[in-house]
Image (cartoon, rainbow, N blue to C red):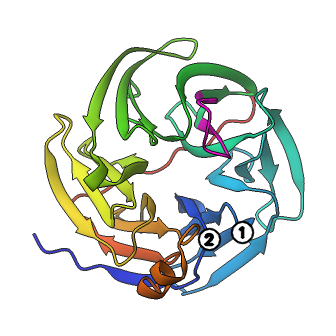
């Protein structure tokens, strides 16, 4: 199957991340972690906006009160859509050198997210869940976490240990909790590092490859089904959007590239898109109260 990649926004983000389709606005939102920015793209109108947030915003998901839920540093923030009003929803008890990273929301409205060592040295990152205002630390320790991604039935969670090139699969229990962990994928140095992951409507896992120049789609058995090449090495995450959720948006980064690599990758940090072979899933809204 031939997949045609297109450049949507050549914005040159330092660390483009956390793309999420916000259905109520028919828009894709994503962040630039190292640039401290929130980006907003409306494919129908072509409108593109950038809001200066400061800090290190790492994800942006819709919240039940109409605001945006954003992870930054050691905090989960409720932010008005224009970025002007911010309320602290939770403060994460973790080392000062840690920060939030990737996230998703399950059908119960729970926010699942990972933390990481911003210096990328110590395995002080972990998987967390924010359930109606209460924080739960669930384990999955790693230097750099990514994901998580949760199947539509809410029973299975994929969690990424990027530094060790490992993607884990867990059973979700009550509490919330995770158990019965198993290695789903172990990538090699030649593959790059698994970064953000997302599941499609067939519960196949799409994996962005940091220093891997593309994204891959894996069956629930771990079989590689599809590879989509990108013109830049540091691919960070996919989000499905559009009216039919068949448009796959891809964020990338240029942080850490030397002069030669930057010259060879002029589109690094851009937002890309392609039409996926199957639809993705709508992102549920995060619940802020019982």
Q: Quadrant of residue 103?
A: top right
| Apparent side of residue 45 relative to residue 71 in the rendered image (left or right) | left
Provide residue 133's location: percent of width, then percent of height: 76, 28
Residue depicted at 65% across the width and 71% down the height: 39
Provide residue 199's location: percent of width, then percent of height: 34, 45
Which residue extends farthest left?
1
Quadrant of the snapshot with the C terminus: top right
124 falls in the magenta region: yes
Task: Say which of 37 and 191 sits in front.
Answer: 191
Task: Say which of 7 and 20 sits in front.
Answer: 7
Up-down relation of residue 145 to residue 6 (above or below) = above
Up-down relation of residue 134 to residue 278 (above or below) = above
Task: Say which of 274 and 284 sits in front.
Answer: 274
Residue depicted at 61% across the width and 85% down the height: 47
| Residues under numbered marks 1 and 2 in contact, where contact means CB atoms less than 8 Å apart | yes
Provide residue 191's location: percent of width, then percent of height: 27, 53
Residue at the spot of label 2: 14
Quadrant of the snapshot with the N terminus: bottom left
Up-down relation of residue 158 to residue 13 (above or below) = above
231 falls in the magenta region: no
Q: Which mark is residue 35?
A: 1
Range drawn in magenta: 114-127
Q: Secondary structure at mark 1?
A: loop
Residue depicted at 75% across the width and 65% down the height: 36
Residue depicted at 48% across the width and 87% down the height: 263
Q: Separation of disc 1 and disc 2 at Cα?
A: 6 Å
| Apparent side of residue 253 relative to residue 191 in the rendered image (left or right) | right
């Amino acid at each position: 199957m031939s997949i045609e990649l297109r450049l949507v926004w050549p914005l040159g983000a330092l660390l483009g991340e956390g793309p999420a389709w916000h259905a109520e606005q028919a828009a894709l939102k994503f962040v630039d972690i190292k640039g401290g920015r929130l980006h907003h793209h409306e494919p129908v109108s072509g409108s593109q906006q950038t809001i200066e947030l400061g800090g290190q915003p790492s994800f942006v998901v819709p919240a039940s009160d109409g605001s945006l839920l954003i992870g930054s540093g050691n905090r989960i923030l409720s932010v008005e859509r224009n970025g002007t009003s911010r309320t602290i929803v939770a403060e994460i008890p973790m080392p000062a050198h840690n920060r939030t990273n990737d996230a998703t929301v399950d059908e119960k409205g729970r926010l699942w997210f990972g933390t990481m060592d911003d210096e990328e040295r110590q395995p002080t990152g972990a998987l967390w869940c924010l359930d109606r205002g209460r924080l739960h630390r669930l384990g999955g320790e790693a230097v750099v976490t990514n994901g998580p991604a949760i199947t539509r039935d809410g029973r299975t969670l994929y969690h990424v240990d990027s530094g060790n090139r490992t993607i884990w699969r867990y059973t979700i229990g009550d509490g919330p909790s995770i158990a019965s962990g198993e290695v789903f994928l172990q990538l090699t140095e030649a593959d790059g590092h698994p970064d953000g992951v997302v599941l499609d409507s067939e519960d196949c896992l799409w994996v962005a490859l940091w220093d891997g120049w593309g994204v891959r789609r894996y069956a629930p058995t771990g079989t590689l089904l599809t590879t989509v090449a990108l013109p830049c090495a540091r691919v960070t995450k996919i989000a499905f959007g559009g009216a039919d959720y068949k448009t796959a948006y891809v964020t990338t980064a240029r942080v850490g590239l030397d002069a030669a690599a930057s010259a060879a990758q002029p589109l690094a940090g851009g937002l890309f898109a392609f039409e996926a072979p199957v639809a993705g899933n709508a992102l549920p809204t995060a619940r802020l109260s019982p």
